[in-house]
Amino acid sequence: MRARIYRPAKTAMQSGQAKTEKWVLEYEPTKRQVLDPLMGWSGAGDTMSQIRLTFDSLEEVVAYADKRNLMYSVQPPKDKIVRPKAYAANFSVSRKVPWSH
C-alpha cells in the first residue's frame, strides 16, 4: 500500500486557518473507479481509499506509517504569503490606478 502525508490547505469557504494545523494520511487508490451500468454511480472495490487519518505532528504520522510498513510520500506544506493591506490605500494620492465609484 502507498500512502500520502500532507497538511491540508484552507478551503475557499473560510477566511481562517481552521483544520490546517493537523497532518493527514490518505491511502492512494489501487483500483480505477468504474461506472455502475444501472444507476450510473461511480465506485470502486478499494475501501482503503476512503480512509483519512489525522495526526497532530509529522513525527506521529511517519511513526504510524513506519510501524505498519507503509510506503509513503510526504508533501511539505507551502509557506503562506501575507500581504498587508489597508483600506486607506484605496484613497492614497500616490495610487497608480485612479479610484472611482
Image: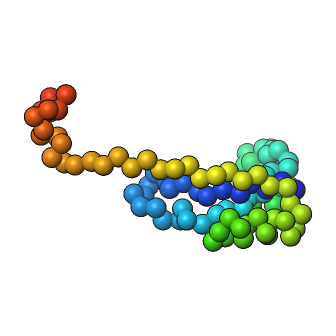
Image coords of residue 23 (percent x, y): 64, 64
Q: Nearer the viewer, residue 57 or 3?
A: 57
Image coords of residue 67 (percent x, y): 86, 70
Image coords of residue 80 (percent x, y): 47, 50
Residue 101, placed above or below residue 37: above
Residue 88, placed above or below residue 64: above
Q: What is the number of callouts on the image?
A: 0
Compared across the picture, whether 44 is left or right of 9 comes to right
Point 42% across, 58% down: residue: 14
- Which quarter of the figure is the C terminus placed in? top left
Compared across the picture, whether 48 is left or right of 20 comes to right
Q: Nearer the viewer, residue 1 or 33?
A: 1
Compared across the picture, whether 16 is left or right of 22 comes to left
Point 55% across, 65% down: residue: 21
Image coords of residue 88 (percent x, y): 15, 46
In this view of the protein, can residue 53 be seen by the observer? no
* Colour theme: rainbow
- Which quarter of the figure is the N terminus placed in? bottom right
Q: Nearer the viewer, residue 30 or 63?
A: 63
Q: Nearer the viewer, residue 98 or 66?
A: 66
In this view of the protein, can residue 3 be seen by the observer? yes
Point 85% across, 55% down: residue: 71
Residue 67, placed above or below residue 86: below
Compared across the picture, whether 46 is left or right of 79 comes to right
